[in-house]
Amino acid sequence: MKVFIEKEKKEKHLVFSGKVSGMLKKLNIDASEALVVREGEVLLDSDEVSGDDEIRVLSVVSGG
Amino acid sequence: MICFCGRKAVYEKAGNALCKEHFIESFEKRVFSTIEEHSLFKDAKSIAVAASGGKDSTVLLYLVKKYTELQKKQHSRNMTLEAIAIDEGIKGYRQETLDFLKSFCKKHLVYLKILSFEEAFGFTLDSAVKKLGRRYGPCTMCGAFRRTLINKAGRGYDVVATGHNLDDEAQGILMNIFKSNTGFLPRLGIRPGAVHHPLFSTRVKPLYFCPEKEVFLYSFLKGFQVPFTECPYAASAYRDIPRRLISELQKHEPLAKEKILAAFLNILPALRVSVEKKEILACSLCREPSAGKVCKACEIKSAFVASGQ
């Protein structure tokens, strides 16, 4: 799957299938500091992601 | 997870799952209840929101605007609302958020007043960091100048609302403990400032009980399109240490932030008693409130001038 990480302004290709919480763990991103979005729809930690998904990981923490 | 109404949830906490519509409704209700229960705008006829173009102050501005409109509609109560923003002079950072804020204010019909370090003090934060960066941290300088400007401008309104959220406050509590700044602790709270004085503007924090992630989620669901930018000096901020610590704590205690805040609110009245008789001085240079003879902003400004323009 394609994962765009806003904080790093980078897109990563990830081989993963499972819960959002597992995907964030694999990406070493703190779930409390990220909002995960697929096709404009907010995903919860317990939602499933896989294969062809295009995911955006938005940074919750202000940069100021 | 599914919301109680049957739609897909976008939010879940302690078994409470909410869809987009019900999350928005619940978030707004919480902020409006905070305003009411803590009498944040009691008797206020003029309100200013300290805005930056970031998500917290944008959400705050939107909700205060909505609140004032509801008050007018339901209780025929008239309150004016304006936004105050500070341009610190940070290249490649502030302009983008200010541009966003300008268009947001235009769209929502809110008058925006922009004050700059350069106009008020004669130099930008970038040039102060360049000259004095070894003596003062960027956040120390920025904080001192921002506080002075917002306080000064804020005296023109009955109340100034700031976008501090639950995470900010929990981090602030720990930060002041770690730095042994126990004298600053009584200044925190939903109505910051331990001492009432005519030189102090009245400040309130309507997002006080809202976790940062929920503020962000609200902003996202409302489609505010707040730009993601990072202050180039943020990496040096001490705040990052308590943020990381709280994040670790949350893995074992999911309500760590809420518990830090609840414990602090229990002891805050006692902390305030310890400082309420403290005398507030006027800075001998700018006449703004100061703990000493010269305020921090004037101390830094003098150091800047002394270092050669």
Image: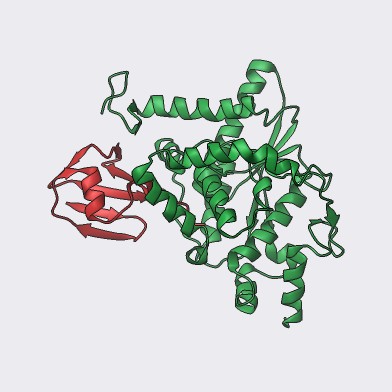
Chain colours: A red, B green
**x then y, percent, for residue B69:** 62, 26
Q: Is residue B153 above or below residue B36?
A: below
Residue B124 sits in quarter: bottom right
Q: Is residue B43 above or below residue B198?
A: above
Q: Is residue B309 left or right of residue B237?
A: right
Residue B74 image position (x, y, % from top left): 64, 16
Q: Residue at x 60, y 77 (%)?
A: B134
Figure disc tally:
0
| A30 with respect to A22 (left or right) | right
| Image location of residue B303, percent across then percent down | 74, 76
Q: Residue furthest bottom?
A: B308
Q: Is residue B88 visible?
A: no
Who is closer to the viewer here, A64 or B274?
A: B274
Point out the image quarter for the N terminus of chain B: top left
Residue B214 in sight from this viewpoint: yes
Which residue appears at 72% of the width and 82% of the height? B307
Q: At 63% across and 25% down in the image, what residue appears? A: B36
For this orientation, the residue located farthest to the top is B74
- Give the camera-side residue of B32 and A22: A22
Can you tell which quarter of the image residue B46 is in?
top right
Q: Quadrant of the C terminus of chain B?
A: bottom right
Which x, y percent locates residue A5?
A: 31, 55
Q: Quadrant of residue B293?
A: bottom right
